[in-house]
Amino acid sequence: VPFCPMVGSEVYSSEVKKTEVLMENFRRAIGLRIKENKEVYEGE
């Protein structure tokens, strides 16, 4: 059974939405890692 411990204070923090925290913990519990790739182009 996938399990990821959570603290109530992290869900109710004002920095991040509640659904965003829950989705992040769901992903962590099922072992899904999401990487963001950012491409930066520099010009003259």
Image: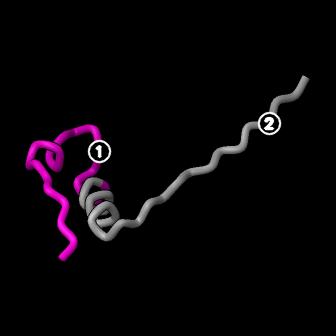
Say which element carries label 2.
loop
Q: Residue 16, image x and y in percent? A: 29, 44
Residues in magenta, as a range: 1-20
Q: Residue 23, image x and y in percent? A: 31, 62
Considering every residue shown, the one lying at the far bottom of the view is 1
Which is more N-terminal, label 2 or label 1?
1
Please, what is the three-letter code of the amino acid marked with disc 1? Val
Say which element carries label 1.
loop
Viewed as shown, does residue 43 lie left or right of 14? right
Viewed as shown, does residue 38 lie left or right of 25? right
Tell how many labels.
2
Q: Is residue 32 shown in magenta?
A: no
Q: Nearer the viewer, residue 33 or 43?
A: 33
Question: Closer to the camera: disc 1 or disc 2?
Answer: 2
Which residue sits at x=22%, y=39%? 14
Viewed as shown, does residue 35 lie left or right of 20? right
Which of the labelled discs sits on residue 41, or is there none?
A: 2
**Placement of 37 over or under 3, stated as above or below:** above
Which of the labelled discs sits on residue 16, or is there none?
A: 1
Please, what is the three-letter code of the amino acid marked with disc 2? Tyr
Which secondary structure is most common in the magenta stretch? loop
Classed neighbour count for the residue bearing mark 1: other residues with Cα under 10 Å, few (<14), some (14–19), many (≥20): few
Which residue sits at x=62%, y=49%? 37
Quarter in which the N terminus is drawn: bottom left
Classed neighbour count for the residue bearing mark 2: other residues with Cα under 10 Å, few (<14), some (14–19), many (≥20): few
Considering every residue shown, the one lying at the far left of the view is 8
Q: Residue 24, image x and y in percent? A: 32, 58
